[in-house]
Amino acid sequence: MPVALRTPRLLLREWRDADIDLFAARLATPEVTAMLPKLPDRAACAAWIGRMRAHNEQYGFAYWAVELPGEAPLIGAIGLSRVNFAEAFGEAVEVGWRLDPAHWGRGFAGEAARAAIEDGFYRFDIAQVVAFTVPANRRSRAVMERLGMTRDPADDFDFHRFPEGDPLRRHVLYRLRRA
């Protein structure tokens, strides 16, 4: 049975094949990926969505397709995923987002992330979620802080997906524990 989360303004839903082209056009652009791992083409976007579908199948949650009902069929990808590397903080569930720049600054990232976190805490009994980004990503860091996440600089790490010397290698880590 398909799962969806609703917020006052958004619908977080499972991915559809029709989302691939919209994702590639709006969420894999240089503006969106300036501080994220790149998704260089439609095939990479389709593979990423395929991984989210598989993650949802395995765990019951993933990064969801986010729609603004009545206005836009896909404005982002927001949700939870199990971190598939153990870096400095060990096994974890991450909350994250990619949002179409046309919808930045309207509180959608925080609204959808809060819904995904609450779903993880209460439906899946997840004790803690993490979020991470490059130090320069002030917008995402502000969302993390508005969500009540906290950072200990001792937890910051070098992300193995970026080579030595890459300006995106260093990451800051935020945590939120279930009350």
Image: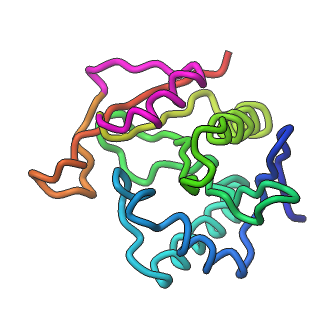
Instruction: Say whether residue 161 is magenta.
Output: no
Q: Is residue 40 above or below residue 61?
A: below
Is 149 contained in the magenta span?
yes
Which coloring applies here? rainbow
**Horizontal arrangement in the rendering, residue 161 relative to residue 104 (left or right):** left
Foreground residue among 48 and 146: 146
Q: Residue at x 27, y 58 (%)?
A: 161
In the image: residue 89, left or right of residue 139: left
Q: Magenta segment, principal secondary structure?
A: helix
Q: On the image, which quarter does residue 139 sit in?
A: top left
For this view, does 172 lie left or right of residue 123? left
* Number of marks: 0
* Magenta-highlighted residues: 136-155
Residue drawn where x is 67% and y is 58% of the image? 75
The C terminus lies in quadrant: top right
Q: Position of residue 178 (x, y in %)?
A: 65, 21
Residue 73: % across, % down? 77, 66
Tell me where residue 110 appears, x and y as whole percent: 64, 34
At 86% from the left and 64% from the top, the residue drawn is 2
Q: Residue at x 34, y 55 (%)?
A: 34
Which residue sits furthest bottom? 43
